Amino acid sequence: MEIRTVGVVGAGTMGNGIAQVFAQAGFSVRLIDVAEPLLDRARQAIEKSLEKFVDKGKLAPADRDAALGRIAPATSLDRLVDADYIVEAIVESAAAKQALFTSLDAIARPDVILASNTSSISITVLAAATKRPNRVLGMHFMNPVPMMALVELIRGQATSDDTMRVASELCASLGKTAVEAADYPGFIANRILMPMINEAIFAVMDGVASAEAIDTVMKLGMNHPMGPLALADLIGLDVCLAILEVLHQGFGDPKYRPCPLLRRMVAAGQLGRKSGRGFYSY
């Protein structure tokens, strides 16, 4: 089956980035979210991102305009009835994703692959909400999507070899490198990253050092391009908390227990860049 039209459900930071890279690669994109203002905000973010590529000489103005022209925003899942491939990028909630996958399963053609951009939730659980578990997989893009080359492909219990092959070839067409992971909580990236971020937050809470000092040590001492606390702010502290809770519950291991300071900051609405304040002010 030739993939020409790709559906992206969820127009947040990840969703609009995913829509952008598919559009830049020549695919027609149906970008779906629940409200027009969210779609308007997503289009503005995509325009701004594409403009940066133009300013750096990496994208011609004509190609920018063509990519924007390939993205069709909509508020109804019914617009995905003729999609050839669908990527889900909504809130990191198992219940919300399961409900969506049940709806997508009823709308999409039986041969269409349903992919989730989840960063930690079980693909097997999401696939069980459909009648096509062999055609469900995880397709975890990294943030910011247009800049990051990696995509984690997660094989659920029933995911077929053909589904994994199609997804891998699709990643190649986007200029991305695909790495396969088994369906364990956090997969590869977040199973390693989140405990580091969590430990950095514990170090702040315990008064070991300031956020700036901790990030400086990791940047200059470990050659990380960004410190773990600045990265947590970029990801969103609420997202970090949600992933740590999945790890803690999935493994039952206290080493994944979310730091109380992280819980307190999320409860206070200090979510990082998107709220204007986290470990740093924006």
Image (cartoon, rainbow, N blue to C red):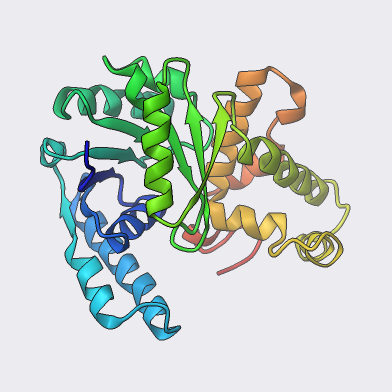
> Which picture quadrant has residue 78?
top left
Give the quarter of the figure containing the N terminus. top left
Image position of 132 (left or right of 210) = left
Q: Residue at x 83, y 67 (%)?
A: 220
Give the quarter of the figure containing the C terminus. bottom right
Residue 182: x %, y % from top left: 57, 25
Residue 21 vs 282, above or below: the answer is above
Residue 206 versus residue 5: which sits nearer the camera? 5
Image position of 94 (left or right of 276) = left
Is residue 252 visible in the rendered image? The answer is yes
Q: Residue at x 74, y 44 (%)?
A: 196
Residue 199: x %, y % from top left: 78, 43
> Which picture quadrant has residue 168?
top left
> Which picture quadrant has residue 167?
top left
Q: Residue at x 22, y 26 (%)?
A: 111
Residue 234: x %, y % from top left: 56, 58
